[in-house]
Amino acid sequence: MERCVFCRIITGELPSKQLYHDEHLTAFRDIHPVAPTHILIVPNRHIASLNEAAPEDERLLGSMFTLARQLARQEGIADEGYRLIVNTGGHGGQTIYHLHMHLIGGQRMRHPMG
Ligand code: 5GP
Ligand code: ZN
């Protein structure tokens, strides 16, 4: 089993401001927020990037959107709007190779991040 930084945050081995945790997904605040709300939503199972997700992961991927919507509501930013980003690979600017979705909001976004 791989033990990347997000794997260790999910298990609590590394500290984070965790907002949500269930059998499949974890959400925690980004350590370097680019906006008032900046949350990372990750599958508990290590999937390096969207490129490594399988067709069988479709339900899991969908549940990341559902959780994003819930957290946006909880943060009070749902009505004003927010941005969801999944950086993938080098050109996509991915730095942590554990699939994650950024939920960013609380201010009007400029192109392309925050
Ligand atoms: P990426 O560039 O791969 O899409 O995003 C990785 C994100 O993870 C970055 O926004 C970065 O600030 C965040 N990050 C990196 N290391 C840590 C950490 O140890 N804890 C938390 N909470 N966020 C991290
Ligand atoms: Zn991992």
Image: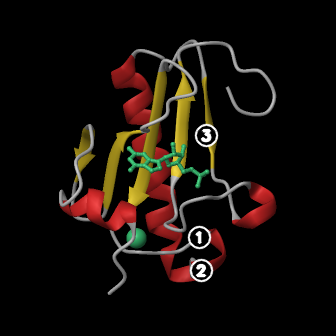
- Residue 9 drawn at (x, y percent): 28, 57
- Residue 20 drawn at (x, y percent): 26, 44
Q: Are marks 1 and 2 in contact (CB under 8 Å)?
A: yes
For disc 3, the neighbor class at 10 Å (few under 14, some 14 to 19, many from 20) is some
Q: Residue at x 57, y 77 (%)?
A: 53
Q: Quadrant of residue 49?
A: bottom right
Q: Nearer the viewer, mark 1 or mark 3?
A: 1
> Compared to 78, does 91 lie above or below?
below
> Compared to 39, does 26 lie above or below?
below
Q: Of the two numbered discs 3 and 2 on the same chain, state the one appearing first in sequence.
A: 2
Q: Amino acid at mark 1?
A: Ser
Residue 52 image label: 2
Residue behind mark 3: 84
Left or right: residue 68 compared with residue 93 = left
Q: Residue at x 60, y 12 (%)?
A: 107
Label 2, ligand 2: CB separation under 8 Å: no
**How far apart are the two marked residues, 3 and 2, measured between alpha carbons?**
19 Å
Residue behind mark 1: 49
Label 3, ligand 1: CB separation under 8 Å: no
What scheme was used to colour the molecule?
secondary structure
Quadrant in which the C terminus appears: top right
Q: Of the two numbered discs 1 and 3 on the same chain, state the one appearing first in sequence.
A: 1
Element at label 2: helix
Element at label 1: loop
Residue 16 image label: none
For disc 1, the neighbor class at 10 Å (few under 14, some 14 to 19, many from 20) is some
